Image (cartoon, rainbow, N blue to C red):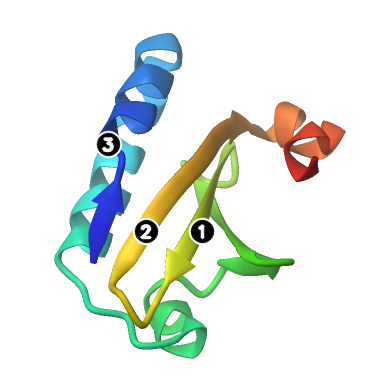
């Protein structure tokens, strides 16, 4: 899958350095995979959830959330946000 963009991940782990290894691992797995569907993605990321048109990943032992728009047919992953669990819970990202 082609991930757009890694910059969002880097920006987040500069603020929360303990997230770097988990985000780098997520990036490596996703960029080296070709998921054909949400069901195929869930085989690798069983805790991923679909929220509307977005996919929410638990990162770093449920401490962080990565929100992405995934276009399976085109092999594209658009990182929409990386949030702490608290920021995610507030729900502002849904707007």
- At horizontal 59% and vertical 31% (from top left) the residue drawn is 83
Classify 10 Å Cα crowding around label 3: few (below 14), some (14-19), many (20 and above). few
The residue tagged 1 is 69
Disc 3 or 2, which lies upstream in sequence?
3
Question: In this rendering, is residue 11 above or below 47?
Answer: above
> In this rendering, would 44 be left or right of 95?
left
Question: In this rendering, is residue 56 above or below 17?
Answer: below
- At horizontal 41% and vertical 84% (from top left) the residue drawn is 43
Task: Residue lying at the far right in this picture: please name it.
Answer: 90
Q: Tell me the quarter of the image containing the N terminus.
A: bottom left
Q: Secondary structure at mark 2?
A: strand
Q: Position of residue 47 (x, y in %)?
A: 57, 67
Discs 1, 2 touching: Cβ within 8 Å = yes
The residue tagged 2 is 77
Q: Position of residue 92 (x, y in %)?
A: 81, 32
Classify 10 Å Cα crowding around label 2: few (below 14), some (14-19), many (20 and above). some
> Quadrant location of residue 44?
bottom left
For residue 6, which numbered disc appears in the image?
Answer: 3
């Amino acid at each position: 899958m082609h991930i757009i963009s890694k910059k969002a991940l880097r920006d987040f782990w500069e603020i929360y350095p303990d997230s770097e290894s988990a985000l780098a691992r997520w990036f490596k797995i996703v960029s080296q995979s070709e998921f054909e569907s949400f069901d195929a993605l869930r085989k690798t990321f069983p805790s991923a959830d679909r929220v509307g048109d977005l996919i929410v990943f638990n990162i770093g032992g449920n401490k962080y959330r990565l929100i992405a728009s995934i276009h399976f047919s085109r092999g594209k992953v658009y990182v929409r946000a990386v949030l702490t669990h608290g920021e995610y819970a507030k729900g502002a990202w849904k707007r």
